[in-house]
């Protein structure tokens, strides 16, 4: 869950690109924002887990 104030937009919001960056590596050509982490957490909690 986002701890930023004001909170970042939800993953399905039209302004989701306004979310805070939480990891940024322009030299590698990628970044991750708070909205992506929120949606990833939801996706991971919905997916079945396997025991290895």
Image: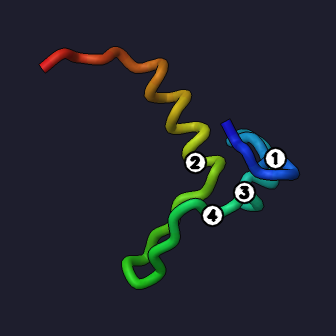
Sequence order check: which comes first, mark 1 or mark 3? 1
- In depth, the one of 19 and 12 nearer the eye is 19
Look at the picture and state if 52 lies above or below 40.
Answer: above
Q: Name the residue carrying label 2.
A: 36
Q: Residues within 10 Å of mark 1 (few under 14, many from 20)?
A: few
Mark 3 near mark 4, Cβ–Cβ under 8 Å?
yes
Mark 3 near mark 2, Cβ–Cβ under 8 Å?
yes
Q: Name the residue carrying label 1.
A: 7
- Marker count (numbered): 4
Residue at 37%, 78% in the rendered image: 28
Q: Residues within 10 Å of mark 4 (few under 14, many from 20)?
A: few
- Residue 45 located left or right of residue 33: left
Q: Name the residue carrying label 4.
A: 21
Residue at 30%, 17% in the rendered image: 49
Residue that sits furthest to the right in the current view:
6
Residue 6, percent from left and from top: 87, 51
Mark 1 near mark 4, Cβ–Cβ under 8 Å?
no
Image quarter for residue 18? Answer: bottom right
Separation (CA) of disc 4 from disc 2:
10 Å
Separation (CA) of disc 1 from disc 4:
13 Å
- Residue 29 located left or right of residue 10: left
Separation (CA) of disc 1 from disc 3:
8 Å
Q: Residues within 10 Å of mark 2 (few under 14, many from 20)?
A: some
Residue 8, percent from left and from top: 77, 49
Secondary element type, mark 3: loop
Residue at 81%, 54% in the rendered image: 15
């Amino acid at each position: 869950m986002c701890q930023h104030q004001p909170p970042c937009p939800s993953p399905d919001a039209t302004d989701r690109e306004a979310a805070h960056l939480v990891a940024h590596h322009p030299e590698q050509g990628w970044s991750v924002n708070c909205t992506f982490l929120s949606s990833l957490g939801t996706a991971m909690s919905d997916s079945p887990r396997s025991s290895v």
